[in-house]
Image (cartoon, rainbow, N blue to C red):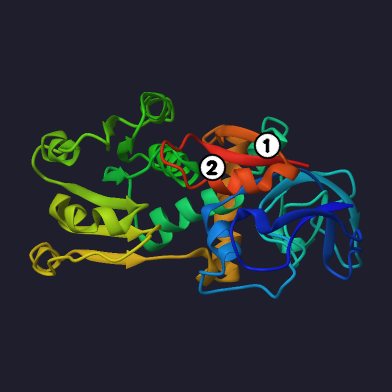
Amino acid sequence: MKAIVVREWGPPEVMKLEEVPTPSPGPGQVLVRVTAAGVNPVETYVRAGTYVRKPNLPYTPGSDVAGVVEAVGPNVTRVRRGDRVYTHGTAGTGAYAEATLCEQAQVHALPARVSFQQGAALGVPYSTAWRALFLRGRARPGETVLVHGASGGVGTAAVQLARAHGMRVIGTAGTERGLQLVREQGAHEVLNHRAPDYLSQVPALTGGRGVDLVVEMLANANLDRDLDLLALDGRVIVVGNRGRIEIDPRKIMSKDADVLGMTMFNAEAEEYRVIHAALGAALENGAVTPVVGRELPLAEAPKAHVAVLEPGAYGKIVLIA
């Protein structure tokens, strides 16, 4: 089979399409024939060698795929050959490939209403949004949430999930296309984060109360301003960051506020079980529908790694195997 292989840390061009052996499932494992693979920003940091967690070289990037179960190993009871599935994680074989090996706990049913391309947009973005909102952020119906970068993969997931749970949603984006997308996903208010004073509109939108929760995708640019926007007992969930920032801790003290970080690498097995049980129900009843903004062939993984970090995010980038 063909797969993207990284043999050294470096720029996107270190990713090469190679012929590799097709893995065979062992006990409790599932072999998935990949139709589409999701591209996540964290994969660019890993490839560059700058992320705190690094796989052993050589490796195949990625964790999110959608496709059909091709084979199952002994003791697999949750899926059968021929099932449509999406994955969140692999058994070390990576997602940027024509087939990947997963532990059965990493494989989840993909309803017929959801395309394979959409299924590839589920794993990291939707689990990150769910964990940020409900497990770390303690989001509740009736609260107001500000989602920065709401037109991207995690952002659209956060808007859909928050709206489905009865929250008031304010979303930001940086292009007219992105702003329209955020509106279509259900945000009550949409702000252009390229306007210099866009956050000054938030107090009026909340009747002067502030927001209960901020889902922050670029903390190095926004965190200090986020603290100004919080209501009493408000929370900021840091999902993404690309550098350092100076903040005034008095802003946290004066509102009994919380600044919380999160990464899916810290999630425990029970959290994954809860997240994907909830996402499965939301997929079946139509409460969430992943947005795919761009599809590229597997061989163009380097181009995808450039695009996923560019401004003007619009949905999810997926590779077609």
Work out which quarter of the rendered image holds the C terminus and state it: top right
Of 196 and 79, nearer the camera is 196
Q: Position of residue 261 (x, y in %)?
A: 36, 66
Q: Is 88 situated left or right of 215 in this image? A: right
Q: Position of residue 309 (x, y in %)?
A: 48, 47
Q: Are marks 2 and 1 in contact (CB under 8 Å)?
A: yes
Q: Position of residue 251 (x, y in %)?
A: 11, 63
Would you identify the image quadrant in which residue 238 lies? bottom left
The residue tagged 1 is 296
Q: Position of residue 185 (x, y in %)?
A: 43, 30
Q: Residue at x 47, y 65 (%)?
A: 263
Cα distance between the residues tagged 2 and 1 = 11 Å
Q: Residue at x 62, y 68 (%)?
A: 9
Q: Residue at x 11, y 35 (%)?
A: 204
Please determine whether, in this image, residue 84 is positioned above or below residue 23: above
Please determine whether, in this image, residue 94 is positioned above or below residue 319: below
The residue tagged 2 is 307
Of 66 and 160, nearer the camera is 66
Q: Residue at x 18, y 58 (%)?
A: 224
User: Which amino acid, mark 1?
Assistant: Leu
Please determine whether, in this image, residue 221 is positioned above or below residue 202: below
10 Å crowding of disc 2: few (<14), some (14-19), many (20+): some
The numbered mark at residue 81 is none
User: Which amino acid, mark 2?
Assistant: Ala
